[in-house]
Image (spheres, rainbow, N blue to C red):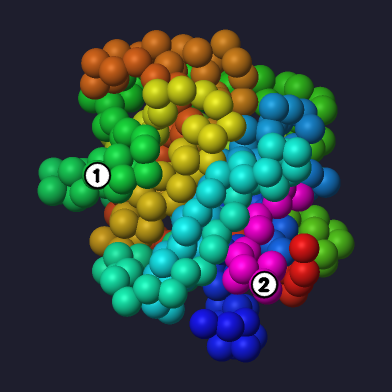
Amino acid sequence: MSLTTLDVPVLDELVGAAVAAPSLHNTRPWRFRLDPETRTLLVHAATDRGLRHTDPMGRGVQLSVGCAVLNLRVAAAHFGWEPVTRLLPRPEQPDLLASVRLARTSRVTAAPGLYEALWRRHSSRFPFSGRPLPSGLRSELTEAAHTEGAWLHFPGPRETGQVLRTTWVAEGRNRADADRATESRRWTSAPHPAALGLTAAAVGPQDALDRVPMRDFGAHRHPAVLPARPYEAHPTLAVLRTAHDRRTDWLRAGQALERVLLVATAHDVRSSLLHQALEWADLRGQLDRLPGDGRRGHTQMVMRLGYGPEGPATPRRGVRESLATGV
C-alpha cells in the first residue's frame, strides 16, 4: 500500500481519533508527524503544553500520549491496518515518545465497540448513581488493563476510604500551592481559542457532602463556578498500577488507562480521573503501599467509575493543529 491510498480523510480520522484521548488538565501535550515513506505516524511530546509545577517529571505527559497512542491503534485496526507500535523508538530524540507504523494485513480485527466508544468517551465530573458495576464488567476492565501490561484493582470499602482521604489531602495542597493553583486556572476557560482549556461547564460541580474529592480547577470554591451537589455515598474506584515506573511504563499505563476507559464507555459506564495524589511523591507512595490485591507496584491512575450523566465534553485541538507531514 502506498501513501496515495492513505486518503487525507482517513489520515484525518486517525489523528482525530488520537486527539480524542484524555490528558491531564486537557493540555493535549502531543504532536503527530507523518513519515510518508514508511507510512508511520510519529508521536512527539508537546513540551510547551506540559504542566511545569503539577507534572515536573513529565509522567502525566507520557500517560496522556499513551492514551492517544491507544486510540490511534484502535482507529488503525478499524481501517484494516496492523498498528506496529514502538515506544521511545529513537533514544537520541527524547521527545519522540512513540511510532505507529500502518502495516498492511488481512488478519487484524478491531476490538468490538472500541472505535465507536473512543468518539463518545469523555470524563464526567458529575455525581453517579449508587448502582454497582457487575462483576463480569469488572473482570472485563481488569483484562483490558492486563492486555496493555498493567493491572487494575478495585479496592474494598476500607481501602477506598484511604484512597479518598489521600486524594483529599492532595487536593488541599494543590489549592494552597500558589504556583499549581495558577497553573490549574490557566487551563480553565483559557481566553485564547488556540489554548482550548477546560470550559467552566466541563469542570463540573463539587461534592456538597465532601465525599468525593473532585479537582477544583479554579483553585477556589465558589458557588457560581463550582456548584455543589451530593455525590454517591460509596464511589466505585479502580486503581491502575504497573510493576515498574520507567518512561515506557508510563506510556504503557496510558494505553492501559485508555483501553479501560473505552471498554467502560462501550458499556455506558461513566468515568472521571482522580489524579491529585499522584502529583505529590509522598502521597503517591502512600497509594503504592495500600494492600491492593497483594501485588506491589506503582500507582499510575485512580479512576472513579459508575452510572450517571455524561456531562459536557471538553474541547479538543483540531487535527491540523496537531499534525505535520514529513520527518
User: Which quadrant holds the C terminus?
Assistant: bottom right
- Residue 143 numbered mark, or none: 1
Q: Position of residue 53 (x, y in %)?
A: 77, 28
Quarter where residue 266 is shown: bottom left
Q: Name which of mark 2 and mark 1 comes first in the sequence.
A: 2
Query: Is 109 situated above or below 187?
Result: below
Disc 2 versus disc 1: nearer the observer = 2
The stretch in magenta equals 34-46
Q: Is residue 157 left or right of residue 21?
A: left
Residue type, numbered disc 1? Glu
Query: Is 308 situated above or below 298?
Result: below
Query: Is 264 situated above or below 33?
Result: above
Q: Which residue is mark 2?
A: 37
Q: Position of residue 70 (x, y in %)?
A: 47, 56
Query: Is 74 situated above or below 281?
Result: below
Q: Residue at x 69, y 27 (%)?
A: 57
